[in-house]
Amino acid sequence: MPEETAAILPRVAIITGGYAGIGFAAAAQLARQGVSVAIGARTRVEASLNRLEECGSPVYGGVLDVRDTGSVESFVADVERELGPADILVNSAGIGTQQTVSQHDEAKWLDVIDTNLKGCFRMIKACMPGMMSRKWGRIVNVGSTAARTAFPKYAAFCASKSGLLGLNRAVALEGAAHGVTATVVSPTWVQTEMMNKSFQAKAKVRGTSFDEEIGALISELPQQRLVQPEEIGALIAFLCREEAAGITMEDIQVNAAAWW
């Protein structure tokens, strides 16, 4: 058995939002390390499942809406039936909307909070009791530097990620005596498909090009580059290892020297 996989076999991981972006990057890295991986999102993407299967570990993909308790409970039960009980939970599902506070559509506000914060709560509630009973578990919540610094016109997103920090601290304390860790990984701008679509939309509104919009952002960043999903996925995978048992209750900033 390769040394790099020996520390975490035979674990089972659930990754929400796992068909794309940071979620997929984390799922792929865990699968390469020998972890059985289950990914879920509102839409099942066969191409992503096929790519994950190439990593060599057992894979399960299903439809999961973290806004719905019934969907969460059904998905977790399906994973246990197909792969076994979840030892690892990566909460990566997330959405955002760009609106000022004074003109914010309440339905969109609630949708962001329901997905980014309450969705994490539902997944943790469904998975954590089993982890505690087995005396081992890893929970990694994908946050954002926006939780501490904020962005104008992204109030719902900032609020959801700030709330996630408080939830994570409580989860870490409750799990500490039972071998369960809980950590937030908070990236700055990451070049995901969702981010690219956002900048394409911005370019259309402004009458510019996608390359111009991305280039303007990069020019403002100290490292003069955008963080890639694979960088975050690798960090998440490490936090799920045996060696990371002492890392809990943390908000790990991946800010690329940009505190925004």
Image (spheres, rainbow, N blue to C red):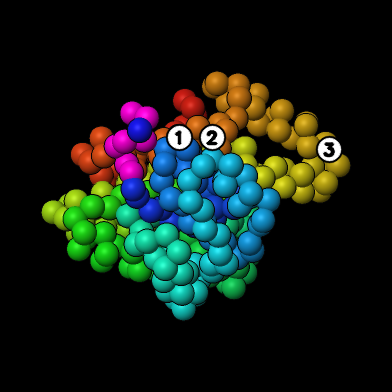
Frontmost of labels 1 and 3 is 1
- In this orientation, does residue 137 appear? yes
Cα separation, mark 2 vs mark 1, equals 6 Å
Local SS, label 2: helix
Q: Amino acid at mark 1?
A: Ala
- In this orientation, does residue 145 appear? no
Magenta range is: 2-9
Circle 3/circle 2 CB separation < 8 Å? no
Looking at the image, is mark 1 or mark 3 earlier in the sequence? 3
Q: Amino acid at mark 2?
A: Glu
Q: Is residue 256 above or below residue 47?
A: above
Q: Which quadrant of the figure has residue 219? A: top right
Local SS, label 3: loop
Q: Is residue 221 above or below residue 210?
A: above
| Residue closest to the eye, 150 or 161 | 161
Q: Is residue 220 magenta?
A: no
Cα separation, mark 3 vs mark 2, equals 28 Å
Are there few (<14), some (14-19), or many (20+) residues within 10 Å of tag 3?
few
All told, the count of numbered labels is: 3
Cα separation, mark 1 vs mark 3, equals 34 Å
Residue under circle 1? 234
Residue under circle 2? 230
| Residue closest to the eye, 34 or 255 | 34
Residue 241 position in % (x across, y down): 31, 39
Circle 2/circle 1 CB separation < 8 Å? yes
Q: Is residue 185 above or below residue 114?
A: above
Q: Amino acid at mark 3?
A: Thr
Residue 216 position in % (x across, y down): 70, 29
Looking at the image, is mark 3 or mark 2 earlier in the sequence? 3
Residue 136 position in % (x across, y down): 23, 52
| Residue closest to the eye, 149 or 189 | 189
Residue under circle 3? 208
